[in-house]
Image (cartoon, rainbow, N blue to C red):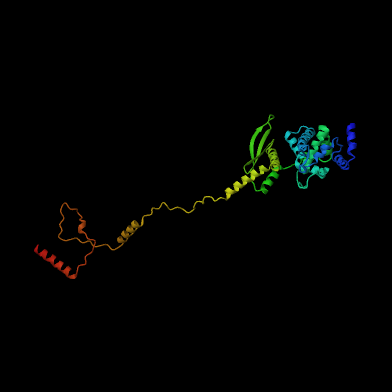
Amino acid sequence: MLNNLIGRVKFFFRKEDKELYASIYDILGFFPDDIKYYKQALMHKSIMHREKGKPINNERLEFLGDAILGAVVGHIVFEHFEGKREGFLTNTRSKIVQRETLNKLARELGVTNLIVTSGNSGSHNSYLGGNAFEALVGAIYLDKGYDGCMRFIKKRILGQLINIDKVAYKEVNFKSKLIEWSQKNRVNIDFVLIEQKKDNSGSPMFQYQVTIEGVEGCIGKGYSKKESQQQASKLTLERLRKEPQYIEAIFEAKGNRTKMEEEPVEIAPDTEPKDDFIIVQNKETANKKTAKSSKKDEAPATATVTPNMEKTEEEDEFDLSDISATPTQATREEIIAAAEEAAFAEQEG
């Protein structure tokens, strides 16, 4: 105790540290025992400060604070909502420790104004405040232990800044947010049922997985389809924010799909009826049939039988050689002579 008091007295001799000490007190509601943890918690990685060859920034404290914050908030939620199911407790904790909430807390507490960064990092970084808040929780844990973190979250955060009952029953539609993102980026999204079963008490359990352009996303579990899809959407949104390679895989798949859609496809079938059931003759055959047909339409020809031609028994009844299709044109004198010859023949007989 005496050593801590001496350390604080020495600390107040430096003006800049005195101001930081007062700011930390305003934020946390208590005096730090070891200020170095809090200094490091407010130091962004863009500073590139090193001590004994090791980089000094808030990344390691952020990692620690993230784990401690989840444990402490989960502990508080578990005690506050007695009898509530695991899904409800998980959702409530998620709403409190989500990035958007931590960013707002960092602004309200004044943490954002104390972050030390280089000129290149810029204040536009949406993770800056939330990351520093988690790093501060890590600093509190190293400085005051788990109980110190519990007091800070209970009294300062949930006691003054967040209404735990309101946030627990506030509906956060992660599925709607994910669908909105997919529509803006014109990517296909689907929710696939992975498993449906009953737990030990007989309650139905669902597992849904998000797929974007066929690329597998995260899986969510819940006691209803809505709850499991919400969980899957939340985890997928977090993955989209943290994993650039995941987004690259999605848009690569989208590019392949749109490329295939733009490629030429097979020509559509003809809708005209086919007349291939009609037998078409060749030109020579058709001409012959036409000529034959036209001869039938002409006047019938006069058949001429050659006189004085007796048929034998071996000959056919009709001798085609005696029939001429060419009519004879007899003169008047020939007709008269033929008639006289026939008359004399009758008289002699």
Residue 184 vs residue 228, the one in the foreground: 184
Q: Classify residue 19 as left or right of residue 289.
A: right
Place of residue 114 in the rendered image (x, y in percent of width and height, measured from the top left) = 82, 43
Picture layout, residue 332 above or below residue 84: below
Residue at the outermost left position = 348
Q: Classify residue 78 as left or right of residue 214.
A: right
If the image is split into quadrants, where does the C terminus sit? bottom left
Residue 258 vs residue 42, the one in the foreground: 42
Residue at the outermost top position = 200
Residue 51 found in image quarter: top right
Q: Classify residue 319 as left or right of residue 150.
A: left
Residue at (62, 45) in percent of width and height: 252
Residue 206 vs residue 41, the one in the foreground: 41
Place of residue 49 in the rendered image (x, y in percent of width and height, measured from the top left) = 78, 41
Residue 167 vs residue 67, the one in the foreground: 67
Give the total number of marks visible in the rendering.
0
Residue at (58, 49) in percent of width and height: 261
Residue 244 visible in image: yes
Residue at (79, 40) in percent of width and height: 133
Residue at the outermost bottom position = 333
Residue 310 found in image quarter: bottom left
If the image is split into quadrants, where does the N terminus sit? top right
Place of residue 132 in the rendered image (x, y in percent of width and height, measured from the top left) = 79, 41
Place of residue 36 in the rendered image (x, y in percent of width and height, measured from the top left) = 83, 37
Residue 163 visible in image: no
